Image (cartoon, grey):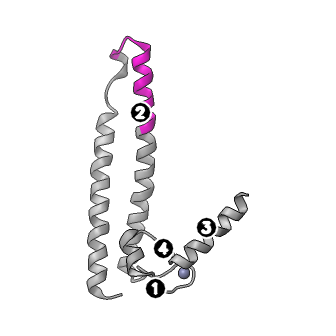
Amino acid sequence: MRQKDIEYFKKILTNQLKELLIHAGDAVSGMTTPKENLPDPADRATIDTERNLMLLIRDRERQLAVKISKALLRIENGTFGICDKCEEGIAFKRLEARPVTTLCIDCKTKEETYENARRV
Ligand SMILES: [Zn+2]
């Protein structure tokens, strides 16, 4: 991969990570609303649901943040854009759509086919 492309993806990934961290901060401050002040149990239930939803989102964001960090690490050690399985280069378009990917489209398709087969 050319240096220019590496820089391009590094920028995308760094921005994504920054946005995630900002959102994570919002979620945390939203969670500090004291529910004890609400006398109606129905209101409390709503807040609990929202809280669960927020935790779920945060969990997903955290997983994505880990993936982005790993992608940035691959950029640092020069393995970014190389398939984990077959060690071929991953198509630029695929990386553009999903910069955190570690598999080329062939290996990803094979993996999904395998997983679907196991699920049946
Ligand atoms: Zn591959």
Which of disc 4 and disc 1 is earlier in sequence? 1
Q: Which residue is mark 1?
A: 89
Q: Are marks 4 and 3 in contact (CB under 8 Å)?
A: no
Against 79, residue 101 (above or below) is: above
- Give the amino acid type for the residue marked by disc 3 in the picture: Glu
Determine which of the numbered discs, if any, sits on residue 51 in the image: 2
Corner quadrant of residue 72: bottom left
- Give the amino acid type for the residue marked by disc 4 in the picture: Thr
- Side (left or right) of 78 relative to 86: left
Which of disc 4 and disc 2 is earlier in sequence? 2
Q: Tag 1's secondary structure?
A: loop
Which of disc 1 and disc 2 is earlier in sequence? 2
Which of disc 1 and disc 3 is earlier in sequence? 1
Corner quadrant of residue 115: bottom right
Where does the magenta region start and end? 37-53
Mark 1 Cβ inside 8 Å of ligand 1: no
